[in-house]
Image (cartoon, rainbow, N blue to C red):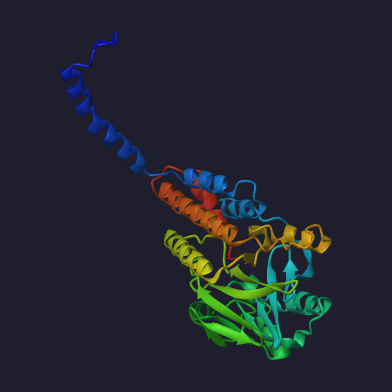
Amino acid sequence: MSFGQSSPSRRALLAAAALLPLVGREAEASAAAPKSAQHYYDRAAKLAGDDPVLRALVKALTPGLTMPPVQPLAPLRIFDDVAVLGTSFVQATALLTSQGVILIDALGSPDDAEKIIVPGLRSVGVDPAKIKYVVVAHGHSDHFGGAQFLADQYGARVMMSRADWNLLAADRPANAPKRDLEISDGQRLTLGDTTVAFHHTPGHTPGTVSPIFPVRWKGLRHTAMLWGGTAPPAATTDKRTLLSSALAFASRMRQAGVDVELNNHGGADNSRARMEELRAGSTGAANPFVIGRSRTQRFMKVMEIMLRGRIVQDQEASAGTSPAAAAASARRSAHACC
């Protein structure tokens, strides 16, 4: 039966079939083509969408970021049992347990400890003499600078990973604390009613540590993480290490049911704005640091994608395809902080 259209000839069908492998190979070649750094940055921005926490992370990990001027930051209890003290640039996080304080990071100097941490704790109703441990998330001066002052004044023990104790021993920076307790990967520290799990997340420094710990908001329990070192290091191999750390830590977060995201540099995750929302009471009963399990995982995914972009950008610079971007990347990575 004819429907007014002739059937394709056998020769035409064979010719079309012969082209199929070529089309397949072209598609495979397109899929396998190396992605540019900008491809990854665009992917991260798309995943972040209009989420202010994720957008802040994209900005923080973008090459060439200029740090804004440092401003004072009023201390605040961001949870029933967690207080944040510091400046707009860097923050210390105090875990307020039933048997004393675990302080994560100690700002940049003895003066910072004396004039920001000590009065900051008092302003949120905590006696600084109750500081039992100072946990240094990584061995840069804006995190360890006040540790020895707190150890001398209150008998606090100072904790850091072995790799970063070694880093301080080699570099001998000003205000470095005396070598004290070493943090091993997976170690747990219990003080009173709070147990903190420490995970090694090297890359930003050789021994960066990121903790996971319980927090309470209006009596309800949540699980928090604090990413210990955000800014990508200068060397590509160290960026790869940081990427591996981000992937491994995301898995640990998933296993622990983390629904709270914290950082020791509030510019990297919109923390400063969230603190002000909390202070003003504009979020009602909700806590803006409780972002949920899926958003904490998206936070780490955005970090992963941005780090992949930074690694590719290094490769582009090595191949001479992006010298301007390479220079910006080098400037951004040169900061011994964050």
**Residue 41: horizontal and vertical position, in percent?**
52, 47
Task: Please indicate, yes or no, whether residue 138 appears anywhere in the rendered image.
Answer: no
Furthest-top residue in view? 4
The residue that appears at 55% across and 56% down in the rendered structure is 298
**Residue 202: horizontal and vertical position, in percent?**
48, 70
Tell me: residue 25, above or below residue 197.
above
Tell me: residue 153, above or below residue 70.
below
Q: In terms of depth relative to the viewer, which is nearer, 251 or 72? A: 251
In the picture, the quarter occupied by the C terminus is: bottom right
**Residue 270: horizontal and vertical position, in percent?**
68, 57
Q: In which quarter of the view is residue 158 placed?
A: bottom right
Q: In which quarter of the view is residue 81 placed?
A: bottom right
- Left or right, 214 with respect to 327, comes to right
The number of callouts visible is 0
- Left or right, 71 with respect to 334, comes to right
**Residue 313: horizontal and vertical position, in percent?**
46, 49
Task: Please indicate, yes or no, whether residue 121 appears anywhere in the rendered image.
Answer: yes
